[in-house]
């Protein structure tokens, strides 16, 4: 099938490359000439394991085609996916301006019958707006249906998530659109959830809000465990063994971040508000998350004897989670800003995300590895649980530091082992 993706970010590029690899001819429309030129050469704008190779292979086979122009791609395509960003506005609502802008451009170039599918995370009712826009601008002879296919991939394992998702949600309002999308997704081995447009739109927000709620619940329980002397990790592991609960996302730490959970929780609160429902549970999820992130700074203060002023803090891990270079809404941003505000000097290292971090975090000294970053530090704070941090020679780290304080905000070290080496160790919930 010939299909098009508008947007080549974490979602657009991965999904486009996977569909190309499955034998489809896939156009990808961008809006930055330099990025499109690079993509044609196989140089990708994001870090995602395995993606560069997948893109190169499919560009070489002429199944993956990049362009700035809507005309040729849209005219040739049976299915067009909108995969552009939907960042939060000041009031928490999703900013849909790019979705609507590209819908208009798509509409103007439709030819024959096309299914226009929104893959971006969008509030319930958005696809109906897309439908109105396209109806207004399309040529008389063009016919189309809309579809909603929200994406559930996780950065860091996006290719395998796209090929083997837990579910493929397809929202449509006609049989023709449903049949076309089911045919396209046939090689994907997730369970199909075929539904109407509004339900598909809502499944995505409900899923992300629930996962964020689970993380905040784990952080709240972990905090209570610290206060009471219970072992938070054992409590959460014990909870998670109940099949009705499940263990994923029950790890306490420095809160959730990234390009999805914070913005999608905010957007769902805003959607509810529009329908006069005060979704207070999600307000509390946000408050607990903020506390979990800032509590790391409190813990650093305690380990440093009450003040972070003029102290050197080594921050290991900046990306919002391991195996990605994505810095959007990363807890490290809030933690580093608060530490700097308290007068601390920051030495940081992240295996992949430093070039993105440099665009956001000012006044930070970046190093090429963990040991260099730890040199002369009063405390090491592990903010992102990259695997390479698990393998660190803690003895060597301690020798390089000014004072041996270890704040393990992701619980990756054995407290007893760290303490036996001579660290003042603090984790989360233990
Ligand atoms: N990142 C994730 O893990 C993830 C997972 C599931 C769903 N989503 C959702 O998918 C959507 C995209 O997320 P993302 O992480 O890929 O975002 P992203 O920021 O990585 O990518 C957005 C893309 O949109 C393009 N774009 C912006 N303005 C444009 C314009 N005017 N015309 C054409 N293209 C334009 C950008 O160039 C970029 O390629 C969002 O709604 C997000 O919530 C993201």
Image (cartoon, helix red, strand yellow):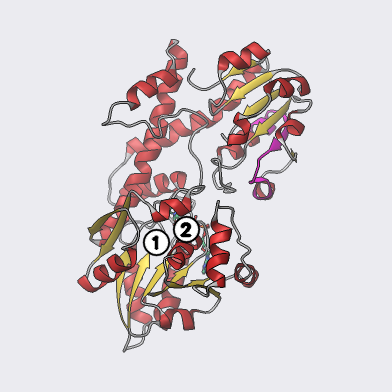
Q: Residue visible at 36% across and 57% down?
A: 150
> Looking at the figure, which quarter contains the N terminus?
bottom left
- Mark 2 = which residue? 11
The answer to the question of whether label 2 and label 1 lie on touching residues, with beta carbons closer than 8 A, is: yes
Q: Position of residue 137 (x, y in %)?
A: 38, 81
Tell which residue pokes out farthest to the left in this image: 175
- Against 329, residue 399 (above or below) is above
Q: Position of residue 396 (x, y in %)?
A: 74, 23
Q: Residue visible at 61% across and 66% down?
A: 42
Q: Residues within 10 Å of mark 1 (few under 14, many from 20)?
A: many
Q: Is mark 1 within 8 Å of ligand 1?
A: yes
Q: Is residue 25 magenta?
A: no
Q: Is residue 309 visible?
A: no
Q: Is mark 2 within 8 Å of ligand 1?
A: yes
- Against 44, residue 430 (above or below) is above
Q: Nearer the viewer, residue 295 or 118?
A: 118
To which quarter of the image does residue 211 belong? top left
To which quarter of the image does residue 116 belong? bottom left
Q: Position of residue 243 (x, y in %)?
A: 27, 30
- Mark 1 = which residue? 119
Q: Nearer the viewer, residue 226 or 181?
A: 181
Q: Nearer the viewer, residue 187 or 256?
A: 187
Magenta residues (range): 338-356
Mark-to-mark CA distance, 2 and 1:
8 Å
Q: Residue visible at 46% across and 79% down?
A: 73
> Regarding mark 1 in the picture, which secondary structure is present there?
loop
Instruction: Tell me: 348 left or right of 228.
Output: right
Q: Residues within 10 Å of mark 2 (few under 14, many from 20)?
A: many
Q: Is residue 342 magenta?
A: yes
To which quarter of the image does residue 201 belong? bottom left
């Amino acid at each position: 099938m010939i299909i098009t993706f508008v947007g080549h970010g974490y979602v657009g590029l991965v999904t486009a490359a996977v569909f190309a690899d499955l034998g489809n001819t896939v156009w990808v429309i961008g809006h930055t000439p330099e990025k499109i030129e690079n993509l044609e050469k196989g140089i990708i704008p994001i870090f995602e394991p395995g993606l560069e190779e997948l893109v190169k292979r499919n560009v070489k086979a002429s199944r993956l085609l990049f362009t700035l122009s809507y005309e040729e791609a849209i005219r040739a395509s049976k299915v067009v996916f909108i995969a552009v960003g939907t960042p939060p506005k000041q009031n928490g609502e999703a900013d849909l301006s790019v979705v609507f802008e590209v819908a208009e451009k798509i509409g103007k170039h439709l030819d024959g019958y096309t299914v226009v599918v929104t893959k971006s995370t969008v509030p319930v009712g958005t696809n109906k707006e897309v439908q109105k826009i396209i109806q207004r601008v399309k040529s008389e002879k063009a016919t189309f249906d809309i579809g909603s296919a929200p994406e559930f991939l996780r950065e860091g394992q996006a290719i395998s998530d796209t090929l083997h998702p837990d579910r493929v949600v397809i929202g449509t309002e006609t049989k023709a659109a449903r049949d076309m999308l089911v045919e396209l997704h046939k090689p994907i081995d997730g369970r199909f959830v075929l539904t109407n447009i509004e339900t598909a739109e809502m499944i995505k927000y409900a899923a992300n809000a629930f996962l964020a709620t689970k993380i905040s619940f784990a952080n709240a329980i972990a905090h209570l465990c610290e206060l009471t002397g219970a072992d938070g990790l054992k409590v959460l592991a014990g909870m998670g063994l109940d099949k009705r609960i499940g263990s994923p996302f029950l790890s306490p730490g420095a809160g959730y971040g990234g390009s999805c959970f914070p913005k999608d929780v905010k957007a769902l609160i805003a959607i509810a508000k529009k329908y006069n429902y005060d979704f207070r549970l999600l307000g509390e999820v946000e408050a607990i998350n903020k506390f979990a992130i800032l509590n790391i700074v409190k813990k650093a203060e305690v380990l440093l004897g009450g003040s972070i002023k003029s102290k050197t803090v080594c921050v290991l891990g900046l990306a919002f989670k391991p195996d990605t270079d994505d810095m959007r809404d990363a807890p490290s941003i809030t933690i580093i800003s608060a530490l700097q505000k308290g007068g601390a000097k920051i030495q940081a290292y992240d295996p992949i995300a430093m070039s993105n971090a440099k665009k956001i975090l000012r006044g930070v000294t970046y190093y090429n590895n963990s040991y260099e970053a730890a040199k002369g530090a009063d405390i090491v704070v592990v903010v992102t649980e990259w695997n390479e941090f698990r393998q660190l020679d803690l003895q060597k780290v301690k020798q390089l530091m000014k004072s041996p304080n270890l704040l393990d905000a992701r619980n990756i070290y054995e407290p007893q082992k760290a303490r036996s080496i001579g660290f003042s160790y603090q984790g989360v919930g233990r």
